[in-house]
Amino acid sequence: MKQKVTKDNWEALIHWNFALVGGFLGVYAILLHMGNFGSAQTGNIMEMAASLVSGEWYDVLLRFLALPLFGGGVVVSYILTNHTNINMRKLAIVVDAAGLVASSLLPLKPVLVGLYPIFFCSAFQWGVYSSANGYNSSTIFSSNNFKQAVLGWTQYFLTKDSEFKKKGILYTNTVLSFFIGACYGAVAVNAFAVRAAYLGFVPLATGWILVVKHSMVLEAERPQEIAKEAETELEDAQRLEIEQK
């Protein structure tokens, strides 16, 4: 039981770390690109609709191009996860780092061009870091996380079920991590403008360390899990033998 708790704790820490990265990416996009959020498509679609109605065709084109970039991040992460043996957690860190570097090098005008790498790397991160301890949870935006945190605590206070408490803690800390990442990003942008992207390497490096540590924990657990499975199979066989007599 102790080993399982340890494994779950590492899983949660990794998730919260990348929620922090998500907050950083979001604020970096918003503060440097006139309020445009690069980690979701809701605002982009609404702005595209407004530009379409007002006849701003160039803006419509720029916003339309963001759709396949974001979708491409989702598709590529899915294909690589399900059809290769690549370590996706590490690859997502590299993709985030590359996205930040590319965004820092692109011009701020037109506004959306500098956001294109953020659209892709955010979606890629979402495809990889999208759950923890059995709970679906985005690390790049917070609406559903906030909803689930409120529901988790409500369910816990009504039922006193410890599972709902675990749910409330996971989602609450995810929202708080996202907020901390946003604060960190705001401070970085105010101090270094576009070069603040390189300060995003700090939580990415922390994430790399956590991912490596988590892999070590899983490796350490493996012999114990095999032994436990063998013990369970032996008990099942003995029980079946007794029943057949």
Image: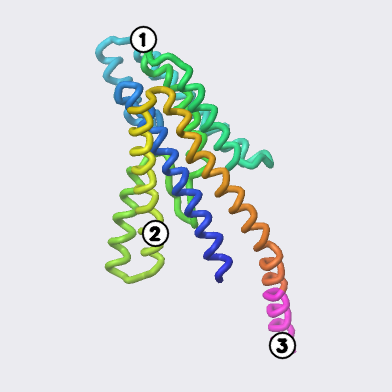
Report the residue marked by disc 3: 242
Report the residue marked by disc 1: 58
The image shows residue 99 at horizontal and vertical percentages of: 51, 27
Q: Is residue 235 left or right of residue 124?
A: right
Residue found 53% across the figure and 44% down from its top? 207
Asked if marks 3 and 2 touch (Cβ < 8 Å), the reply is no
Pick the quarter of the image with the C terminus.
bottom right
**Residue 208 or residue 41, whichever sits in front:** 208
Asked if marks 3 and 1 touch (Cβ < 8 Å), the reply is no
- In front: label 3 or label 1: 1
Q: Is residue 154 left or right of residue 3?
A: left
Residue found 54% across the figure and 27% down from its top? 98
Helix, strand or loop under label 2? helix
Q: Find the distance from the CA under tag 1 to the CA under tag 2.
A: 45 Å
How many neighbours does mark 2 have within 10 angstroms: few (below 14), some (14-19), or many (20 or more)?
A: many
Q: Find the distance from the CA under tag 3 to the CA under tag 2.
A: 41 Å
Disc on the earlier residue, 3 or 1: 1
Kind of residue indicated by mark 3: Ile
**Residue 108 or residue 162, whichever sits in front:** 108
Report the residue marked by disc 2: 167
Range drawn in magenta: 231-245
Disc on the earlier residue, 1 or 2: 1
